[in-house]
Amino acid sequence: LGFSGGKSKSMYGKDGHLGITLVKFAATPAGLKECEHLAEFFEKDNHGRRAWARVQASSSSDDDKNPDLVKVDERTGEKKRVLYGYIGTAFDLEKVDFDLRKKALIKSRRDFDLSD
């Protein structure tokens, strides 16, 4: 997507991939700005937190036919997953594995000097 500075980690559960990929940015003002930039990118395309919650509520057993989750290229017929993204909060920690939760450090935006 053209963003740099973040490290991604796919999330797995007992049944395999959860369909979630976590992107971790540096715990610095610059990392927060990059994170916010990525979240704004998704929000601009209506693929942020609210849209993801709507898709999850209406999700059926056949996700491959759900246009909110899969787009089909009209020329090639190739299916591509639709990506959603948002800034995680302390509430979202329950969605990640125990080891990651144990290492997490939650900071308020007020903890950062955003003038950098």
Image (cartoon, grey):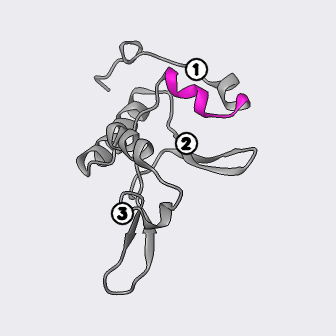
Q: Is residue 39 above or below residue 70?
A: above
Q: How many marks?
A: 3
**Cα distance between the residues tagged 3 and 1:** 36 Å
- Quick one: which residue is furthest to the bottom in this view? 75
At label 3, counting other C-alpha atoms closer than 10 Å, the crowd grade (few under 14, some 14-19, many 20 or more) is few
Front one among 88 and 60: 60
Q: Which residue is mark 2?
A: 22
Q: Position of residue 18 (x, y in %)?
A: 62, 48
Residue type (three-letter) at the residue carrying disc 2: Leu
Residue 85 falls in which quadrant of the image? Answer: top left
Q: Are marks 2 and 3 in contact (CB under 8 Å)?
A: no
Q: Quadrant of the N terminus?
A: bottom left
Residue 29 sits in which quadrant? top left
Tell whether position 48 is magenta. Answer: no
- Callout 3–callout 1 Cβ contact below 8 Å: no
Real-space Cα distance between discs 1 and 2?
15 Å
Residue labelled with disc 1: 105
Q: Amino acid at mark 1?
A: Leu
- Of the image marks 3 and 1, the number of the one nearer the N terminus: 3
Q: Decide: is 20 above or below 62.
A: above
Question: Nearest the camera: 21 or 105?
Answer: 21
Mark 1 or mark 2, whichever is nearer to me: 2
94 within the magenta span? yes
Q: Secondary structure at mark 2?
A: strand
Name the mark on residue 67: 3
What amino acid type should be assigned to the residue bearing mark 3?
Pro
Residue drawn where x is 44% and y is 44% of the image: 56
| SS type, badge 1 | loop
Q: Going from the N terminus, do you reach mark 2 or mark 3 first?
A: 2
In primary-sequence order, the first of circles 1 and 2 is: 2
x then y, percent, for residue 62:
51, 62
